[in-house]
Amino acid sequence: MRRRFGTVATLAIAGVAILVGLTACTVDDPQPTAPATSRPTPADLGTPVATAPEFHPELSATENLPYFDWVNAGVIAANAAAGGRDFIDALVAAGFDKAQMQVTADATTIGDPADSMQFSVVFQGECLVGQYGPKSDGYHGAVRPLLGTGTCLVGQTRTIDW
């Protein structure tokens, strides 16, 4: 029995010595490497990158509708609760003429939020019209004929005085 105990004790001591030796041989790295935080871009993956449409003031309203829609989609992406002024300001910043714009009210006459709002730009003898609001099922953009009044929207519109 002594022989077995001695053998077991010897093996246990040898095991501890091996563990201590292995621990001493490991590299001490107090700062673990942080995982990469950057993600591959579509270009890195070989995926074509969609470019933003360009504004071409010399072309028709139909040819500029993708740009008009792109500007308005940017407004919504930045603020899902965007109001008429947000759209008008973004369209002006994008190069459209504020003097050629119309916008409907953001609120009803009793102060409730409007079900939807419309905004427009007279452009090359036609109308670029956008509509957005909770009851309009998202954003919609279209090219419509100019009205006999020389404007785009029917009914009461807000004065764009900012």
Image (cartoon, rainbow, N blue to C red):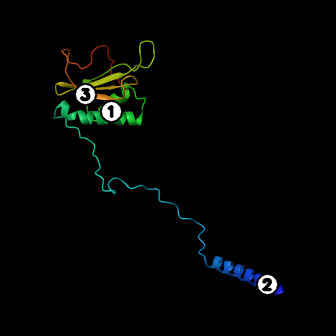
Closer to the N terminus: mark 1 or mark 2? 2
Looking at the rendering, in which quadrant would you find the N terminus? bottom right
Residue type at numbered disc 3: Ala
The image quadrant that residue 82 belongs to is top left
Q: Which residue is mark 2?
A: 4
- Give the secondary structure at mark 1: helix
Q: Residues within 10 Å of mark 1 (few under 14, many from 20)?
A: many
Residue at horizontal 43 percent and vertical 20 percent from the top? 113
Residue type at numbered disc 2: Arg
Vertical position of residue 1 compared to residue 38: above or below: below
Q: Which residue is mark 3?
A: 142
Closer to the N terminus: mark 3 or mark 2? 2
At which x and y percent is residue 93? 31, 35
The image quadrant that residue 119 belongs to is top left
* Real-space Cα separation, disc 3 to disc 2, in angstroms: 92 Å
Residue at horizontal 79 percent and vertical 84 percent from the top? 4
Q: Which residue is mark 1?
A: 72
The image quadrant that residue 38 belongs to is bottom left
